Image (tube, rainbow, N blue to C red):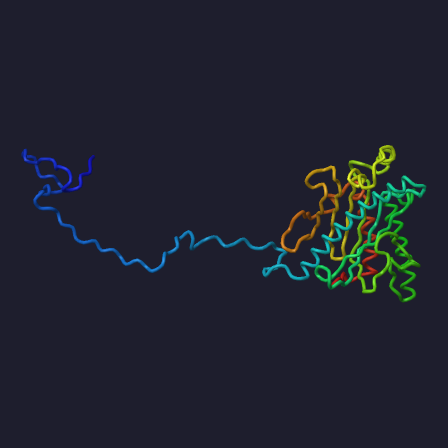
Amino acid sequence: MSYNVPGRHAQPSWDDGSPTPPWGPPVSPQQPQQYPPQQYPQQPAYQQQPSWHQHAAPPPPPPQWQQPGGPTQEDRRWAYLRHSAGTSLRGINAIHVTRALERLHSRDQPLAPHGVTLFFVTEAPAQHLGYQVLSASRWGYAGPEYDNLIAFLTGLNATAETFIAQHEKAGRVWDPRDPDYLMVNVGDIERPSTPTRYVGIGMETLNTDSRQWYEVVPVLLSSGISSLQAMSYVPGEGAAQLVDGSEIRVVRDDNKRGRGNDLICNNPLDATQVYSTTQNVPERLGTQLRQAWPAFEELARTLAGHLNPHGQVW
């Protein structure tokens, strides 16, 4: 079917007696068809937005743990404290390797592969968020008492309970850094001039599911590897529990790509986003730390109940 605009193309002839077509007689060329002037509505002064733009989907809601107005100062402080405790424990585990190797090359008594670290907070206006994290650790010598992580934690808990009972009887608060009742022997042992507050405990080990410390010792002794090289060769693992209920897992393994050096926590490690988190840290631990977790929790309750019963930090 053809569409002929009037006046441009020839119209079919209807002079052969055929009836007039239904749309009327053809327009005569001498009488051009007149069209009324077109009337266009006046355009508005602005361009109206399309409907799809006017009804755009609202932005996604913030995470449930985050305040609608953004993270508070307390959120930032706790997130930074969790991250600082985890990275500090990972660094202590790396130093544990170097100190243990140094003793292997000397006549000093070798170190056991496990350690415990206590975390404290002190005011420091010049530091980030106005406070500083201090850590004091306990490393034991190789032997039956310290080579077994569960026995190590159980023994420390019994010692802590004895010291606590003695001090409570005298109406005092026991401090694990007290030279006369010392529980730690490495790190920030000397108390600073500013007041400090206990905020949590961590445990770390040079035994992992892939490499056991006493299986690696002969290789270290025969290879002549340096202390710094040993930090990359010997992996480690740790876990921490803070007074707010935060549970943190620490992984230190330079032989693994990607998440070989990672922190996971049951609470946010960053005040603006949630990353590397899990809801059940004990299940993610290696075999030895997972088996020792009940004894670790008992020691954490003993210390927190005496040093910071209300979980107050700031």
In which quadrant of the rendered image does the C terminus lie?
Answer: bottom right
Identity of the residue drawn at 84% across and 43% down: 98
**Residue 31's spot in the image, x, y percent?**
8, 46
In the image, residue 38 above or below residue 122 = above
In the image, residue 7 above or below residue 241 = above
Identity of the residue drawn at 70% across and 47% down: 264
Residue 108 falls left or right of residue 12: right
Toward which corner of the image does residue 243 lie, by quadrant?
bottom right
Residue 242 falls left or right of residue 275: right
Q: Nearer the viewer, residue 69 or 187?
A: 187
In the image, residue 4 above or below residue 123 = above
In which quadrant of the rendered image does the N terminus lie?
Answer: top left
**Residue 202's spot in the image, x, y percent?**
80, 50
The furthest residue to the right: 107
The furthest residue to the bottom: 171
Identity of the residue drawn at 86% across and 56% down: 189
Residue 224 falls left or right of residue 251: right
**Residue 125's spot in the image, x, y percent?**
73, 64
Q: Nearer the viewer, residue 312 or 187?
A: 187
